[in-house]
Amino acid sequence: MEINVEHLKAVVRNVVSDSIKEDKLKKIDDKKEMLKQKVNKLVAFKKQNYGKMDISSPMSKEEKDLDKEIAGIYSEINQLIIEKRNIG
C-alpha cells in the first residue's frame, strides 16, 4: 500500500490550521469576557455615582471621562467580535 505524501501533508496542515484557529478564538473569547466584566463594573459604578441625572447642569469631567472609557471598551468588544467572525 502506497502512502500519498501530499495528501498526508494537507491533512496535517488542516489539523494545525484548525488548532491555531481554535486557540485564537479561545483567546478572543477570554479577552471579550474580561472586557465585559470590566465594562459591567464601570456601568454599575456610573449608575451608583451618577444615576440621578439633572438635565439642568452639565456632566462633570469625571462622568464624561467614564463615558469615554465605557465607550472605548464597547468598541474593543465590537472589534473582537469582528475579528472572531473573520477567523471563523
Image (cartoon, rainbow, N blue to C red):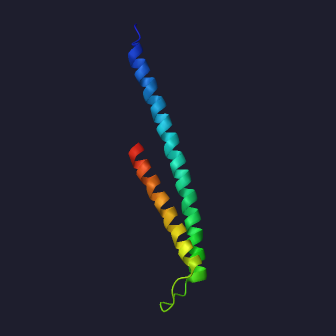
Identity of the residue furthest to the top in this view: 1
Q: Nearer the viewer, residue 43 or 4?
A: 43
Is residue 58 positioned above or below 62 on the image? Answer: below
Outermost residue on the bottom side: it is: 56
Indicate the position of residue 44 as horizontal and vertical percent values.
Answer: 58, 74
Which residue occupies 46% across, 61% down? Answer: 75
Please tell me which residue lies in front, 72 or 4. 72
- Residue 22: percent from left, percent from top: 49, 40
Classify 17 as above or below 63. above
At 40% from the left and 23% from the top, the residue drawn is 10
The residue positioned 56% from the left and 51% from the top of the image is 30
| Residue in the image at 41% along x and 11% along y | 3
Image quadrant occupied by the C terminus: top left
Residue 88 visible: no
Q: Position of residue 74 (x, y in %)?
A: 48, 63
Q: Quadrant of residue 5?
A: top left
Task: Mark yes or no: residue 51 visible.
Answer: yes
